[in-house]
Image (cartoon, helix red, strand yellow):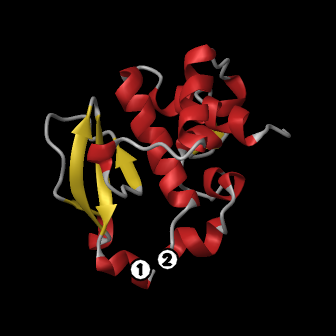
């Protein structure tokens, strides 16, 4: 589908963090935009400043895929109906805003437990903060070697 960057980000925010409150949704939007604006590593090479390249990079966002493990994924951006809140958060992030406590976080995940692991896989990220159900990770020097 030919979504604008605004529409695409609003849909991704709703899908990935719709139940996480305003800060949780802003944190996810911040991670996406941190990837878009990455100055080195994998996201700088693949993203090349494009939100679309970042969102649709294979294996990055479950919500950007209509199938997972060979089965239909009903929780995807194509099935989202963003509200004014999701668009406002997309506008906020596209304007260059970020949550200050998030740092330069490039990853997030829901551990489905009360604790976050200290390192993101392959030691490319370290735990920065937990917001709601998601753990957010800043890049280590090892990330820039990817």
Q: Earlier in the sequence, mark 2 or mark 1?
A: 2
Question: Which numbered marker is on residue 136?
Answer: none
- Is 63 drawn above or below residue 117 in the view shown? above
Position above or below: 89 against 43: above
Q: Give the quarter of the figure containing the N terminus.
A: top right
Picture residue at 69% right of the left edge, 23% below the top: 79
Q: Is there any visible trace of residue 73 in the rendered image?
A: no
Q: Are marks 2 and 1 in contact (CB under 8 Å)?
A: yes
Packing grade of label 2 (10 A; few <14, some 14-19, many >=20) is: few
Where the C terminus falls, by quadrant?
A: bottom left
Residue that label 1 marks: 144
Locate residue 144 relative to residue 90 in the image: left or right: left
Q: Where 58 falls versus 69 (above or below)?
A: below
Q: Residue furthest bottom?
A: 145
Residue 139 as seen in the image, left or right of residue 71: left
From the top left corner, tell me how far across and down residue 72 is, in percent. 65, 33
How many marks can you see? Answer: 2
Q: Position of residue 30 (x, y in %)?
A: 46, 45
**How many C-alpha atoms fall within 10 Å of the one at disc 1: few (<14), some, or many (≥20)?**
some
Q: Position of residue 107 (x, y in %)?
A: 39, 54
Instruction: Kindly identify the residue that appears in the image at 56 percent across and 46 percent down.
Output: 69
To which residue does mark 2 refer?
40
Using the image as rendered, state which of residue 45 and residue 85 is in the foreground.
85
Q: Residue at x 67, y 69 (%)?
A: 48
The answer to whether residue 45 is seen in the rendering is yes
Q: Nearer the viewer, residue 112 or 47?
A: 47
């Amino acid at each position: 589908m030919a979504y604008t960057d605004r529409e695409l980000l609003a849909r991704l925010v709703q899908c990935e963090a719709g139940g996480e409150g305003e800060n949780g949704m802003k944190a996810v939007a911040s991670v996406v935009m941190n990837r878009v604006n990455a100055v080195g590593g994998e996201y700088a090479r693949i993203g090349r400043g494009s939100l679309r390249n970042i969102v649709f990079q294979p294996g990055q966002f479950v919500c950007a895929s209509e199938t997972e493990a060979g089965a239909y994924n009903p929780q995807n951006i194509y099935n989202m109906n963003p509200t004014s809140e999701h668009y406002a958060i997309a506008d906020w992030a596209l304007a260059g805003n970020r949550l200050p406590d998030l740092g330069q976080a490039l990853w997030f995940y829901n551990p489905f437990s009360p604790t976050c692991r200290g390192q993101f896989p392959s030691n490319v990220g370290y735990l920065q903060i937990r917001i709601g159900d998601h753990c957010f990770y800043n890049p280590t020097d090892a990330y820039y070697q990817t």
